[in-house]
Amino acid sequence: MARSFDASASERLLVETLELVAEGLAQDMGFGLVVISTLDDDEMLTRAAVAGVRAEPDLRGHRYPASELERELRRSDVWGRWRFVPHDRIPPDEMSEDYVPVMPVVDADDAWHPMDLLFAPLYDEEGVLRGTIGLDIPLSGKRPDATQRDRLDEYARRASRAVVDAVERERLQRQTRLSKRLRHAVREINDGQQLKTMLQQVQPLLTECFDAHGSWLHLNPTGGYPASDRVHNWCGEAVEIAAGTVALAEPFSTLLWEAQETGVLGAGPDADVWLTTEQQQTVDELFGSLHLATALFVPLGSGRTPLGHLLITRSDADAVWTQEDRSEALDFAHDLGAAIVRIRVAEREAQLLRELRDLHLAKDQLMDTVTHDLRNPLAALDNLLRMLRGMEEIPPEGETMLDSISQVSRRMRRLTDQLMALSRANRDGGLDQVTDLGAVVWESVEVSRVLADAKGVTLQWTPPSTPVHVAGDSLDVGSIAANLIGNAVTYTPSGGEVRVVAELVDGLAVLEVTDTGIGIAQEDRERIFEEFDRSANPRALRESGSGLGLAIVRTLCQRLGATLTVESEVDKGSTFRVVVSAASP
């Protein structure tokens, strides 16, 4: 199924990552437009990120078949990792109607034409296409020369790794969300129940209910699960079934499940004629070796998915499978199929949870490594920016470029700071300390007051009437307050109000942050505390952010044993409340 554009928190993080890559490429290589597209499951390329001085928001989200890329690859020149298609190789009937840049054409032999194409296919380590990077509108007005191509090739190598990693990370996060949905189904299964045990319990019961000689239950070997082939007679003895006979039955189980019908095999008066002469001979030999006369073939499945089949056998050649027998057997197959799926989900989730624990540990280690490695170069970048701004006679275009670099640097610094805070929040410890809640919250209020004054938002602070202390590190408590107050100011428009209250109520320390901002929709309230999640409200998306603030707040509240609640109404505002047991100073 194709993913809807910008449909989830993980996809929004993917877009943000791709935009950082695109912005870096646009600035470093001197192109007015950079477009990064990702390949969907339905072989469609989606423009996920656009950047550059000529970037237009309408370009983002456009989808086109991957076959169009294959067509351009066939007629392109190879420039290392890049592919170049001169405009004169594109037939008039194939000229893009989606976007044609308006740009002056310089008077030079190597002038860039508005219909020239320059793109780099992005492949993973297995050679599978994952997306593309497209460049347009070179600021020089010319096609890249040999030196520029070498630089482009090196940048494509590094960008390809970053983009492929980002796409893979988004896939893993989708897998994580899937595991959460699976847990509910697992709770419906008895603890410790195994598929093999359940099958052993079901088959004897099945033969008893249908007055049968025995039963054959076969599960198709799909999805990493092996087949299960058993014949149970009246005393419970199990007999292996030949692999050739199993292979004969598999296609019929799929066809009958799709039709929601059963079939009768053997020499009985109600036998269905649906086998070839050779197939019927194979069945007769099997029945003869097991002293069987007739059998009811019942497809097994769940929803639209065939899982295998039941073969309920009888030794009496005159026995007739009534319509009631057939109907009850098919209903039983539905119930059995659902039970098998639940057990398989439990087995798969146990494995997935183990992998997720490993992934969570690896994620923390990666965040520690990345954030620490980024802080030094970011500090160096800030120093260089200050030196450059101190130089005389900086041209206007230079000021614009410095502003862009400074903006990206601030964005990266905020992201690294929050990643470090989230990593720290996931660690134990700090509860042996006691923190003055009022003092810590006051510091956060004063920090946010600068932004509030700049936006024209009234920030009101009501300190506790008596000192209130809580068990926890002052950095943790301060991070909770700073994120809640900062968010309230950020998402409250000019003329609005943010009220911060800390108080002691019946032995409980209470921190309450109320704003008159844009509010949070009910559907967003379900997931705002997830990592990298941001509201789908367009007004909220206009404000920059990583989607980590509330995840940090939730994690720290859990660590401190605090209760975190939110009340909100769209266009009227929100109230976040943190309640934790007060501590002795």
Image (cartoon, helix red, strand yellow):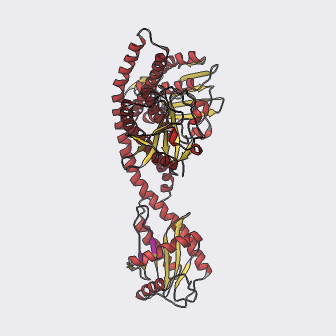
Q: Is residue 379 above or below residue 354?
A: above
Q: Is residue 19 above or below residue 333?
A: above
Going by the picture, which residue comes out furthest to the top?
392
Going by the picture, which residue comes out furthest to the bottom?
318
- On the image, the x and y values in percent for residue 338 come to 52, 64
Judge left or right: residue 579 versus residue 433: right
Tell me, yes or no, whether the highlighted magenta stretch contains residue 221.
yes
Viewer-proximal residue, 14 or 458? 14
Tell me, yes or no, whether the highlighted magenta stretch contains residue 312.
no
Q: Which residue shows up at 48% across the image and 46% down it?
A: 174
Q: How many numbered dots are placed on residues in this image?
A: 0
- On the image, the x and y values in percent for residue 324 come to 61, 79
Query: Taken as a whole, is the magenta stretch helix, strand or loop?
Result: loop
Which image quadrant is residue 323 in? bottom right
Going by the picture, which residue comes out furthest to the right?
571
Residue 583 appearing in the image: no
- Quadrant location, the C terminus: top left
Q: Which residue shows up at 41% across the image and 52% down it?
A: 352
Judge left or right: residue 331 versus residue 31: right
Judge left or right: residue 169 versus residue 539: left
- On the image, the x and y values in percent for residue 5 come to 56, 42
Viewer-proximal residue, 146 or 264? 146
Which image quadrant is residue 372 in? top left
Viewer-proximal residue, 280 or 462? 280
Residue 74 appearing in the image: yes
Q: Which residues are magenta?
A: 217-230
Viewer-proximal residue, 47 or 80? 80
- On the image, the x and y values in percent for residue 240 come to 37, 78
